[in-house]
Image: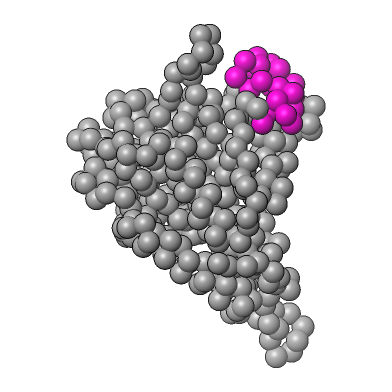
Amino acid sequence: MIKSGIRGSGFGVREDVDRRRPADWQPTAPIPNLRKRAEILATIRTFFAERNVLEVDTPLLSAAASTDVHLNSVAAGAGYLHTSPEFAMKRLLSADSGDIYQICKVFRADEAGRFHNPEFTLLEWYRVGWGYRRLMDEVAALLAQVLATEAAPIRLGYRDAFMQELNLDPFTAHEDTLAAAVRSKGLDAPNLNRDECLDLLAGSCVYPALGCDRLCFIYDFPASQAALARVRSSESAGQPPVAERFEVFFNGIELGNGFTELTDAAEQRRRFAHDLARRRELARPEPPKDQRFLAALEVGLPECAGVAIGLDRVAMLVCDANHIGEVISFTAENA
């Protein structure tokens, strides 16, 4: 069990010999935080070893890239540094790897701030034959151990979370109503579609209020926000379908995103095309689709659930850090 409580001083850097400014070669994280980070990684590997989940290693560099409208890949030579190991890991699953996990570096351009660095560490795992609800239980078990929390997790539907914080139904509200809600919160931005309004409201108003000293899971997202998740028709007449997707928070900080995984190759191609069309509208680069991943789906991805957890944010909570630079050796500014 890993206990929190180590706080860095600023970025934890030592001063150079003239004592006037931090030396550029110094790590941004205090060494005690890096030791605590190593303990987190050891705990995770023990957790999965006890459950017979295989650790795998896939390439950082790929010929293709994520088409996600909100992610910008880093071009490197003839390829792209991956934003997630998801496509490669699903190729392993299609090759009958069984349950797998990976701890790796991932890269996302134009991301920097308190909780963001262009290069960061992701934990991703997949459970064959599982759905998203069962996977939420395992995520809760792992994070409770790492964060040393015994408080029972909260589970809240996406609709319920919006109703609770904004008195707004995200499934039925008209797009003009959502745009007005964005403006009323002083969050107005041009050219936002319905889902982008929801994302902005969620990130600014809903999520920060969640997970007070305990894990909180938000689940059953609008089908239009399925990403790579399976969509389920509602059991109630007249109710919209939902994406079997969840996000997990602690103290209002988003830690991870999980799905019951989409296994339909034709639907995945349609979603890629939709993403690229939106990127074109926004004049953003259109990366090549991962045709090898699509070929693996054609052969057959087993029914499974998967999740990705941002380990730097987890380390921030464990170390009681204020900035991601306090838990990684070197930020983009001094890498």
Side (left or right) of 96 relative to 275: left
Asked if the magenta segment contains residue 26, the reply would be: no
Relative vertical location of residue 330 with respect to residue 307 in this rendering, above or below: below
Side (left or right) of 231 relative to 111: left
Is residue 298 in view?
yes
Q: Which residue is at a point 74% across and 23% down the rendered structure image?
A: 167
Q: Which residues are magenta?
A: 161-182
Residue 146 picture quarter: bottom right
Q: Position of residue 219 (x, y in %)?
A: 55, 33
Q: Which residue is at a point 40% across and 29% down the rendered structure image?
A: 230
Q: Which residue is at a point 50% across and 55% down the rendered structure image?
A: 142
Q: Position of residue 141 (x, y in %)?
A: 51, 53
Q: Main secondary structure of the magenta part?
A: helix
Residue 271 picture quarter: top left
Q: Position of residue 217 (x, y in %)?
A: 58, 40
Residue at the limit of the structure toward the bottom, as seen here: 17
Q: Which residue is at a point 45% across and 43% down the rendered structure image?
A: 135
| Of 223 and 115, the residue lying toward us | 223
